[in-house]
Image: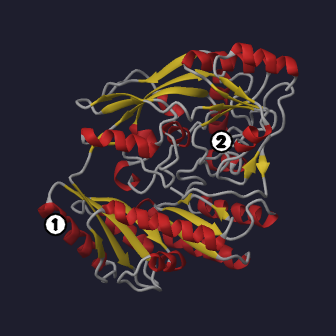
């Protein structure tokens, strides 16, 4: 960026403009192996200032990359070479809570965990809970359509998004969606924003739906028999209507062994595990739900008595601790995010294990069994040729089995070349048409999600996988 452009930036926006080398280094990457070299970091003060920033970027054809907590796993919030990072981490206010109509207005930089804490006194919560909820922002949750364990019952972020205020790449401020319970006024444009990864506009305010806090949330850990069908188990638990299940999680034997070592618990150390969460209104209902879960599991061969956590959060804290331990043991690695129909889960697991043997690379697997959504992990350097080969095989396996290349992490940089194979050229052209209307100069997060869109003019090169490391947030 030239001196005249920087000078114009400082006079165009009211927010801070940071250009020191240490400051820029903090914003090079996210939790993926992708990195770029930004030329400035700007913290807009309000929506009007965000408009000013976009108009400046459009004037000079400078890429803009929106960033919140920086916990993206496929490069969605990694800087682009020559870009300006729009830092929304300071936009962390809970603007309004409507306890009667069950919605809240929030700023995009509000961290998921902080929102949950502020809603608790109202007896409410925001159901999407990605594994990175301690650092991930609501804006980031919307941008990647994040999910998490409770999506078994509640679905992804898209299902909980009511309204978005954003500044498009044209500099126009728009409001998509509605706060009313239902509307039939053509296709709902707010749906376009969920999962758009900051490529259509800079979110300045979000209205999300809320749910009443369950009176009781209990965690169960169930050892699984070796060689049992995960497909049959997922289908049985999905079909039961009296279990109160809100989360159905799976971890394989390698990950389960680490979980067992974190705490002396009474379950086999060499078995894969189910981690379940049950919601209920009172103790009697909780007991009936638990009995229904045990009957369903027994019907598919999982007869080992479960370990019960009276507070489900204790179980998820333990799972998080095991993830940190795995990070320490396995180091930097390929971490993928795919999903298949429930009837193809066993086929997917077999393919993923085969990929690990072919590499060869240490492999472990965990994910959201109840939705056929898994996170395969391979201990190879994430920026290496071996990592590219593994990723290609994993994504191809999911597509071959009728699944998706991304269940909840998004597309970012790492998967952009596979998007047309999943969506098809016609669908991709339609998305590209939306991108061209919202961001005609291609300045918003270029190189991410939309493979056809490149910024015009001298806007720098796309970010790419790097060999650098850093701490890793847990998967969804």
- Look at mark 2 in the image and give the residue it sits on: 77
- Look at mark 1 in the image and give the residue it sits on: 288
Question: Against 322, is 269 above or below?
Answer: below
| Residue 7 location, quadrant | top right
Question: Against 390, is 95 above or below?
Answer: above
| Residue 100 location, quadrant | top left
Instruction: Tell me what residue is drawn at x 63 percent, y 23 percent.
Output: 438
Which one is nearer the viewer's eye here, 409 or 91? 91
Percent across and percent down for residue 343 are 45, 66
Q: Nearer the viewer, mark 2 or mark 1?
A: 2
| Colouring scheme, one of rainbow, by chain, secondary structure, one colour | secondary structure
Q: Residues within 10 Å of mark 2 (few under 14, many from 20)?
A: many
User: Quick one: SS at disc 1?
Assistant: helix
Q: Is residue 13 left or right of residue 252?
A: right
Q: Residues within 10 Å of mark 1 (few under 14, many from 20)?
A: some
Instruction: Tell me what residue is drawn at x 79 percent, y 58 percent.
Output: 467
Q: CA distance from mark 2 to mark 1?
A: 44 Å
Question: Against 419, is 54 above or below?
Answer: above
Which one is nearer the viewer's eye here, 169 or 266? 266
**Mark 2 vs 1: CB contact within 8 A:** no
Q: Which quarter shows the N terminus?
A: top right
Residue with the most extreme left position? 284
Instruction: Say if residue 344 shows up in the picture.
Output: no
Percent across and percent down for residue 15 are 64, 21
User: Quick one: SS at disc 2?
Assistant: loop
Percent across and percent down for residue 322 are 50, 70
Instruction: Say if residue 112 shows up in the picture.
Output: yes
Instruction: Tell me what residue is drawn at x 61 percent, y 67 percent.
Output: 327
Query: Which labelled disc corresponds to residue 118?
Result: none
Instruction: Tell me what residue is drawn at x 35 percent, y 39 percent.
Output: 118
């Amino acid at each position: 960026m030239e001196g005249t452009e920087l000078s114009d930036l400082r006079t165009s926006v009211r927010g801070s403009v940071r250009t020191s080398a240490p400051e820029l280094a903090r914003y090079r990457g996210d939790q993926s192996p992708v990195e770029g070299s930004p030329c400035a970091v700007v913290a807009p003060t309000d929506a009007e200032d965000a408009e000013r920033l976009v108009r400046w970027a459009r004037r000079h054809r400078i890429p803009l990359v929106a960033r919140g907590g920086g916990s993206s796993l496929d490069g969605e919030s990694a800087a682009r070479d020559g870009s300006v990072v729009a830092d929304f981490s300071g936009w962390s206010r809970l603007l309004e809570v409507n306890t009667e109509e069950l919605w809240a207005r929030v700023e995009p930089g509000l961290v998921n965990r902080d929102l949950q804490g502020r809603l608790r006194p109202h007896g409410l919560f925001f159901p999407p809970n990605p594994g990175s909820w301690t650092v991930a922002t609501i804006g980031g949750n919307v941008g990647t359509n994040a999910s998490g364990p409770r999506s078994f019952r509640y679905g992804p972020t898209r299902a909980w998004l009511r309204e978005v205020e954003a500044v498009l790449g044209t500099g126009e401020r728009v409001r998509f969606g509605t706060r009313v319970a239902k509307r039939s006024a053509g296709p709902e444009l707010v749906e376009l924003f969920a999962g758009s990864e900051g490529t259509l506009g800079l979110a300045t305010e979000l209205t999300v739906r809320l749910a009443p806090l369950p009176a009781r949330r209990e965690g169960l850990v169930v050892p699984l028999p070796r060689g049992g069908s995960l497909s049959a188990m997922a289908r049985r638990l999905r079909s039961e209507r009296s279990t109160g299940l809100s989360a159905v999680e799976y971890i394989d034997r390698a990950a389960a062994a680490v979980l067992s070592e974190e705490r002396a618990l009474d379950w086999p150390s060499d078995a894969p595990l189910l981690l379940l969460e049950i919601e209920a209104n009172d103790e009697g209902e909780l007991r009936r739900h638990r009995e229904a879960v045990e009957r369903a599991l027994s019907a598919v061969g999982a007869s080992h008595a479960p370990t019960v956590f009276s507070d489900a959060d204790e179980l998820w804290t333990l799972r998080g601790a095991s993830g940190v331990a795995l990070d320490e043991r396995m180091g930097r690695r390929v971490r993928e995010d795919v999903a298949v129909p429930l009837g193809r889960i066993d086929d997917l697991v077999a393919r993923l294990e085969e990929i690990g043997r072919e590499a060869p690379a240490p492999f472990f697997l965990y994910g959201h069994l109840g939705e056929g959504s898994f996170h395969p992990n391979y201990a190879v350097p994430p920026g290496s040729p071996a990592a590219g080969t593994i990723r290609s095989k994993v994504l191809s396996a999911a597509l071959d089995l009728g699944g998706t290349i991304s269940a909840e992490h998004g597309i970012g940089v790492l998967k952009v070349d596979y998007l047309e194979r999943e969506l098809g050229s016609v669908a991709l052209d339609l998305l590209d048409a939306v991108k061209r209307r919202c961001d005609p100069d291609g300045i918003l997060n270029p190189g991410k999600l939309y493979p056809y869109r490149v910024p015009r003019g001298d806007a720098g090169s796309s970010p790419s996988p790097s060999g650098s490391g850093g701490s890793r947030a847990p998967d969804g």
